Image (cartoon, rainbow, N blue to C red):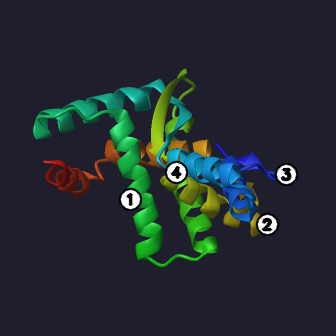
Amino acid sequence: MNKPIENTVKYSLYEEELSDLSYKPTGLIDKFIFYATRKITSTMDIDYTIHIPVSAYLRGEYLCEEISESIQDSFSQRDLISILIDDFLYAIKDRKLTTYGAYTEIIEREQNAMRLYNIQIEHNTEIVCSIKRKIALKLEIMLNDIYELGAQNIYSTNNLIQILYCNFIQRYKEGELATFLRDLIKRLA
């Protein structure tokens, strides 16, 4: 899921944000275009594609159908992924983890997630999810900080989403998430 360290890592939203913050528009038209563009792009959703085992996808679909029935409203895998990302970021903030602590947390989740891949060789399928640009930028800032640590493993945003999803499905499969699911249904109802 992760990649070995490369000489250059591109976190495009992070780099774009740094570039925008250092840019000083000069004329009135330049200022208007710059600020209008920033306003529009700040509310955009960013699409990410993750590849997961078909068994994990099927289990996720089944879970989402159960949640949909419980809350009597539509609940998709995209919704699930958004919640997993929000909960991950909240856990990092709530536990006041340092950059190294966040890196360790990702590694632990990755090791659990890899158990889905180690069971058997099977085909993968894709899930496309949309994330608010602001959330995607938070992820990229965190991942860039981890990269700057000189960490052994570097993660793209896609890698991290895949890890969060597969870790969740593995824990769900093992029956560890009964209270989480109950709380999630209460939260959505």
Amino acid type for the residue under numbered disc 3: Thr
Q: What is the spatial separation of the Cα atoms under label 4 and label 1, in whole angstroms?
A: 26 Å
Residue type at numbered disc 2: Gly
Contact check, label 3 and label 1, Cβ < 8 Å: no
Q: Is residue 34 above or below residue 21?
A: above
| Sequence-first disc among 4 and 1 | 4
Disc on the earlier residue, 3 or 2: 3
Q: Amino acid at mark 4?
A: Lys
Disc 3 target residue: 8
Label at residue 142:
none
Question: Horizontally, is 77 left or right of 3 in the view?
Answer: left
> Where residue 96 sits in the image (x, y, percent)?
48, 79
Looking at the picture, does residue 171 appear above or below residue 126? Answer: below
Q: Which residue is mark 1?
A: 87
Q: Going from the N terminus, do you reach mark 3 or mark 1 first? A: 3
List x then y, in percent, for residue 62. Answer: 27, 29
Residue 172: x and y, percent? 33, 45
Between 129 and 52, the residue placed more toward the observer is 129
- Give the CA separation, mark 3 to mark 1: 29 Å
Mark found first going from the N terminus, 4 or 3: 3
* Element marked by disc 4: helix
- Sequence-wise, the earlier of marks 4 and 2 is 4
Residue marked by disc 2 = 150
Query: Which secondary structure, mark 2?
Result: loop
Spatial CA span between label 1 and label 2 = 26 Å
What's the residue type where badge 1 is placed?
Asp
Q: Nearer the viewer, mark 4 or mark 2?
A: 4
Q: How many marks?
A: 4
